[in-house]
Image (cartoon, grey):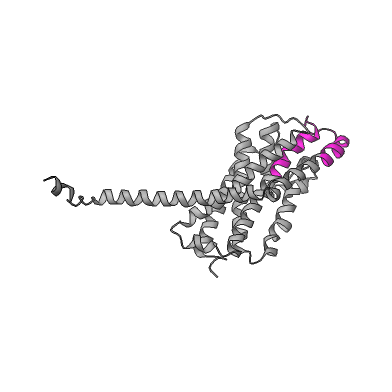
Amino acid sequence: MALEATNRAPAPLSPLEAGGAREFSLARTNWVGYRTIVIREYGRIMRIWGQTLAPAAVSAFLYLLIFGGVVGRRMGGLSGYSYLAYLGPALIMLQIINNSYANVVSSFFGAKFGKHIEELLVSPLPDWLIVAGYMTGGILRGMLIALVVSAVTLLFVRLPIHHVEVVVLAALLSSIVFSLAGFINAMYARNFEQMNIVPTFVLQPLTYLGGTFYSIHMLPGWAQRLSLADPILYMINAFRYGFLGLSDVNVMMSLAMMAGLAVALYVTAVVLLHRGVGVRD
């Protein structure tokens, strides 16, 4: 009887149990794939830290030394704060934006150029998860850069934090937006020169005209109205508000705009990847 019980075939799973097992297996596959992309991105950031982390620290140091230490002495304060304190949050956000964008555009284009993007495309991973994995890599670099540049900034000036939740939310949403923008740019780019078109002719002008070094209230009326069309203005001001309690624009509107832009770019990136734009040509 014992031998007969041992050799007996297992009872078949019910349709409900079989469906649950398939869902568990799919969720596990997706989690392993997502984690693999994120670990690879983090490893890439840390492996070439001299290209990913160090330049931001050096750039912030020079900005603070020249604009804050030299020019700032002649300008005096802004809205009750020293020019260094006013400049500090904007420089941190500036580096978050640039590095979140650069990480994803270089990583995904490198995957296209090296042809190992095909391994992801033929894997069972859904498109939304592949986009989320690269986006998370951009967020990781953005947050690491935020810590590095904040440490450099604290060498020059002490920054108060009035609303820590606004600081975190503004940094996270800005990093998401530009990580996704980098992903979309990488999909359309066909060579390394095309990777630099957006940073040079779009990103850089917007960052310098977005209230990084000044309050838009210092500008004439027409220039103020023109500045309100710059999305980076809202990101910098929301981040600055979290530190100093100062903003040239409505903070809740700024956060809502960033959230809406993040959703729109994420959906766009997933649709483009599903269609194979730039990767299946």
- Does residue 114 show up magenta in the picture? no
For the stretch drawn in magenta, the main secondary structure is helix
Position of residue 160 measured from the top left corner of the image (x, y, whole percent): 70, 29
Where is residue 46 shown, x and y percent of the image? 63, 47
Looking at the image, residue 120 lies above or below residue 69 = below
Q: Quadrant of residue 194?
A: bottom right
Q: Looking at the picture, tell me which residue is in the foreground, 110 or 250.
A: 110
Q: Residue at x 69, y 40 (%)?
A: 148
Give me the residue at 51% from left, 55% from top: 130
**Residue at the spot x=63%, y=31% of the render?**
163
64 left or right, relative to 12 = right
**Which residue is farthest bottom?**
281
Query: Residue 73 magenta-drawn?
Result: yes
**The C terminus appears in which quarter of the rendering?**
bottom right
Residue 125 vertical position relative to residue 255 in the rendered view, above or below: below
Which residue extends farthest left?
1
The residue lying toward the viewer, choosing from 266 and 119, is 119
Looking at the picture, how far across and down is residue 114, in whole percent?
59, 64
Give the camera-side residue of 125 and 245.
Answer: 125
Residue 257 visible = no
Residue under the image location 58 percent in, 43 percent down: 256
Instruction: Give the residues drawn in magenta, as a range.
Output: 65-94
